[in-house]
């Protein structure tokens, strides 16, 4: 089970310096994160360690992460955004 404190911390870490990232990350953290398994929650936290420019490039599909697990997380976030 994910603690509300953890989600609140990650909510603020998901707020980035780019509105384009906020629009994707904030709904994902509020709608999906708590339902992820431990591996995917850790993967999301790892995604947040990357620079905004890299994450933005991945979400705009101009580049892909070298790590296949990060590729999967990017796809999960993008898929969530398309269902909105």
Image (cartoon, helix red, strand yellow):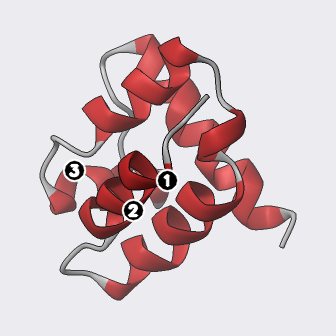
Residue drawn where x is 49% and y is 53% of the image:
4
In the rendered image, residue 74, in percent from the top left (x then y), is placed at 51, 40
Secondary structure under tag 1 reads helix
- For the residue carrying disc 2, how many other residues have a C-alpha within 10 Å: few (<14), some (14-19), or many (20+)? few
Secondary structure under tag 3 reads helix
Q: Is residue 24 above or below residue 69?
A: below
Name the mark nearer the viewer: 3 or 2.
2
Q: How many marks?
A: 3
Quadrant hosting residue 49: top left
Residue drawn where x is 26% and y is 46% of the image:
48
Reading the image, the residue beneath label 2 is 8
- The foreground one among 57 and 24 is 24
- The quadrant the N terminus occupies is top right
| Sequence-first tag of 3 and 1 | 1
Reading the image, the residue beneath label 3 is 54
Q: CA distance from mark 1 to mark 2?
A: 6 Å
Residue 41 lies left or right of residue 76; in this view the side is left
Reading the image, the residue beneath label 1 is 4
Residue 36 lies left or right of residue 20; in this view the side is right
Name the mark nearer the viewer: 3 or 1.
1
| Sequence-first tag of 3 and 2 | 2
């Amino acid at each position: 089970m994910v603690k509300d404190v953890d989600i609140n911390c990650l909510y603020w870490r998901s707020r980035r310096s780019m509105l384009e990232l906020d629009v994707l990350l904030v709904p994902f953290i509020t709608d999906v994160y708590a339902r992820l398994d431990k591996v995917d929650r850790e993967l999301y936290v790892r995604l947040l360690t990357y620079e905004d420019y890299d994450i933005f490039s991945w979400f705009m599909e101009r580049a892909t992460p070298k790590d296949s697990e990060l590729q999967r997380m990017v796809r999960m976030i993008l898929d969530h955004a398309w269902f909105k």
